[in-house]
């Protein structure tokens, strides 16, 4: 009896050793990944789905049969189901059969790739309802940039409510969508998306959700393109949601942060201090002022401060300011410039900043947007301005 048990154990150990050797051999053959090596691996383990999957790549004539055998052995192999679907659709022209394979892949694996595959499939078939169903499911789990999905969505329809409904309540996806819209100049669709983002984020830190990079840059893109109305709506959402403290401009009071009490946001409807050689700009919020130092070696024409303003074309405005300097000699070359953007012509220029304190002007009637800039231009026959001056307040109102 003891001898029989001993022989049984020896035979078991021998069988285990043979199996381990065969498994190691098959694994090494699989790693070689050649037509011959994979065939040998399948010969050693004919019921191993992974090896059948790989052999399908090397035997195109047998690909479908090998993949079918693979999913019989491992029904949870979503990759094999996906490859079968593509083969059935592209090679056999069997759309209904391909749909079944793709749906099976999504049934056994709820991650991104099966959902993205179905999104693409229904896009190819122009099945709008199923496309948006799977596009939303893909966006709910995707770890990748979503621009390809957004591009397909806009290619299949321009119905903004249908498009918005396909965007899940994932802040990063909503932010990516807003960025996509701005980059593709779908400016009118941006404000509702930003408003939704702010609502979904709730008490989250705005800096963590794109306020100072993606949203700020999108805001600048809109203003540079002359899309003032959607830019103001985005600005209002940021203000209403507590993401910024700067006021919301309108055509009657177009200027923001005119008392310089809030640190410059440097985007949208707030001041941007320009970093120019030979110039230093310091905002001192505690004293509600901006101190500007001109070293005398700046360029002949430099922009010091600028802000987009919501000025109504053809209307009369007054710009008032307080500026002081005991060092800069007249004429200083310092003046306000109103630049029409996108379709407008005729730059307007105020009087000398240090000699005057008010400027009345009529906004050009043919412009879509305006940029107010404090600039320093060297007067003809004079040296470049040199010294320090302070700007203590600026206000603008429609008359």
Image (cartoon, helix red, strand yellow):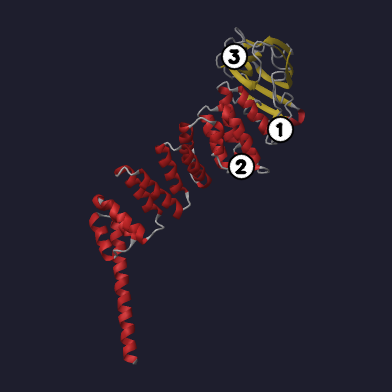
Disc with the residue nearer the chain's start (2 vs 1): 2
Percent position of residue 2, x then y: 34, 91
Residue extending farthest front: 96
Q: Secondary structure at mark 3?
A: loop
Find disc 1 in the rendering and name its residue. 245
Disc with the residue nearer the chain's start (2 vs 3): 2
Observer-nearest residue: 218 or 83?
A: 83
Task: Please report the residue visible at 62 percent of the width from the left and 37 percent of the height from the top.
Answer: 196
Q: Is residue 372 visible?
A: yes
State left or right for residue 36 relative to residue 359. left
Q: Mark 1 to mark 3: distance in Å? A: 28 Å
Residue extending farthest top: 381
Q: Mark 2 to mark 3: distance in Å? A: 36 Å
State left or right for residue 43 relative to residue 119. left
Callout 2 crowding tier (Cα within 10 Å): few <14, some 14–19, many ≥20: few
Q: Secondary structure at mark 1?
A: loop
Percent position of residue 182, x then y: 54, 30
Task: Please report the residue visible at 57 percent of the width from the left and 25 percent of the height from the top.
Answer: 222
Percent position of residue 375, x then y: 63, 17
Find disc 3 in the rendering and name its residue. 367
Disc with the residue nearer the chain's start (1 vs 3): 1
State left or right for residue 44 relative to residue 225. left
Task: Please report the residue visible at 69 percent of the width from the left and 18 percent of the height from the top.
Answer: 251
Q: Quadrant of the C terminus?
A: top right
Height in image: 278 above or below 36? above
Of circles 2 and 3, the one toward us is 3
Q: Secondary structure at mark 2?
A: helix
Image quadrant in which you'd find residue 284: top right
Numbered circle sitting on residue 69: none
Percent position of residue 301, x then y: 58, 16
Find disc 2 in the rendering and name its residue. 208
């Amino acid at each position: 009896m003891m001898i029989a048990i001993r022989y049984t154990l020896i035979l078991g150990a021998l069988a285990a050793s043979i199996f381990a050797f065969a498994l190691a051999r098959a694994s090494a053959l699989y790693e070689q990944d050649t037509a011959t090596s994979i065939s040998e691996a399948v010969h050693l383990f004919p019921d191993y789905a992974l090896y059948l999957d790989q052999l399908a790549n090397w035997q195109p004539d047998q690909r479908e049969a090998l993949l079918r055998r693979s999913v019989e052995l491992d029904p949870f192999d979503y990759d094999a189901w996906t490859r079968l679907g593509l083969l059935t659709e592209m090679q056999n022209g069997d759309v209904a059969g391909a749909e079944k394979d793709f749906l099976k892949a999504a049934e056994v694996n709820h991650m991104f790739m099966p959902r993205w595959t179905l999104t693409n499939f229904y896009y190819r078939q122009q099945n709008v309802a199923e496309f948006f169903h799977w596009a939303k499911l893909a966006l709910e789990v995707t770890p990748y940039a979503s621009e390809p999905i957004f591009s397909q969505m806009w290619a299949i329809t321009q119905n903004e409510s249908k498009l918005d409904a396909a965007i899940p309540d994932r802040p990063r996806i909503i932010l990516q969508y807003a960025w996509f819209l701005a980059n593709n100049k779908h400016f009118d669709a941006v404000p509702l998306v930003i408003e939704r983002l702010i609502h979904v984020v709730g008490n989250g830190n705005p800096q963590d959700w794109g306020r100072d990079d993606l949203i700020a840059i999108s805001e600048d893109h809109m203003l540079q393109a002359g899309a003032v109305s959607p830019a103001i709506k985005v600005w209002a959402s940021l203000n209403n949601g507590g993401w910024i403290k700067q006021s919301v401009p309108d055509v009657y009071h177009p200027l923001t942060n005119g008392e310089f009490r809030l640190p410059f946001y440097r985007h949208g409807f707030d001041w941007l201090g320009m970093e120019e050689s030979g110039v230093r700009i310091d905002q001192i919020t505690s004293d509600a002022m901006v101190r500007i130092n001109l070293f005398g070696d700046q360029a002949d024409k430099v922009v010091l401060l600028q802000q987009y303003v919501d000025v109504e074309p053809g209307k009369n405005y007054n710009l008032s300011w307080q500026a002081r300097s005991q060092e800069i000699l007249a004429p200083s070359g310092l003046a306000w410039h109103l630049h029409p953007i996108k379709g407008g012509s005729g730059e307007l220029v105020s009087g000398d900043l240090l000699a005057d304190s008010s400027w009345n002007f009529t906004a050009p009637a043919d412009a879509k947007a305006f940029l107010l800039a404090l600039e320093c231009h060297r007067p003809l026959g004079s040296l470049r301005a040199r010294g320090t001056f302070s700007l203590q307040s600026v206000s603008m109102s429609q008359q």
